[in-house]
Image (cartoon, grey):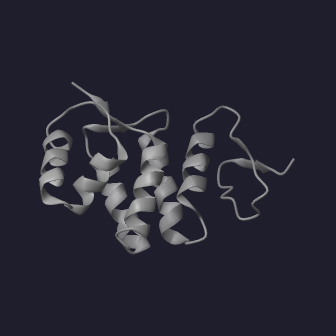
Amino acid sequence: MGGLLDTSMVVRYLTGDPPEMAARAAGVIDREDGLKLTAGVLMETAYVLASVYEIERAILVDNLMAFVQKENISPMGIDKRLILQALLLCRRSGRVSYADAMLWAAARSTPEKVVYSLDEGFPSDGVEVRTG
């Protein structure tokens, strides 16, 4: 059937909390084909898992990567491999935000591969970072 996943579904699925909502999320995520995931939902999920559930960054990234790799889930507008590479940028460095990582992946998905940023630490592998 397919459809877009909301942050609440992903968070409940990954945390198992609360159990009744987690079971409903698992019922969708483990059974439905053609599920779509936006970069925004990934960023918000990372924020909730870090700030509310206080999950360590490396574990959080590993869980998000495993989730994105599910066969029935496809990121919208960005190649799955680039999403995984972007998440690895976050795992290696606490300096790279999830938002910057997703922007990096989005830029790598465009023909121009250009990002305008005043952030001197913006990841530049495979993209041109312009300051103005």
Tell which residue pokes out farthest to the right in this image.
132
Q: Quadrant of the N terminus?
A: top left
Is 64 situated left or right of 30 in this image? Answer: right
Which residue occupies 71% across, 34% down? 112
Query: Looking at the picture, how far across and down is residue 17, in whole percent?
Result: 21, 61
What residue sits 69% from the left and 59% below the top?
122
How many numbered tags mark residues here? Answer: 0
Occupied quadrant, residue 111: top right
- Specify whether 27 is left or right of 120: left
Vertically, is 24 above or below 96?
above
Above or below for 30 versus 63: above
Q: Is residue 61 left or right of residue 89?
A: left
Residue under the point 44% across and 39% down: 38
Q: Is residue 69 at all visible to an observer of this figure?
A: no
26 or 95, nearer to the observer:
26
98 in relation to 33, above or below: below
Residue 131 x %, y %: 84, 51
Q: Is residue 73 visible?
A: yes
Name the spot of residue 31 as percent of width and height, x first: 14, 38
Q: Residue at x 62, y 34 (%)?
A: 110
Task: Tell whether 42 sits left or right of 93.
Answer: left
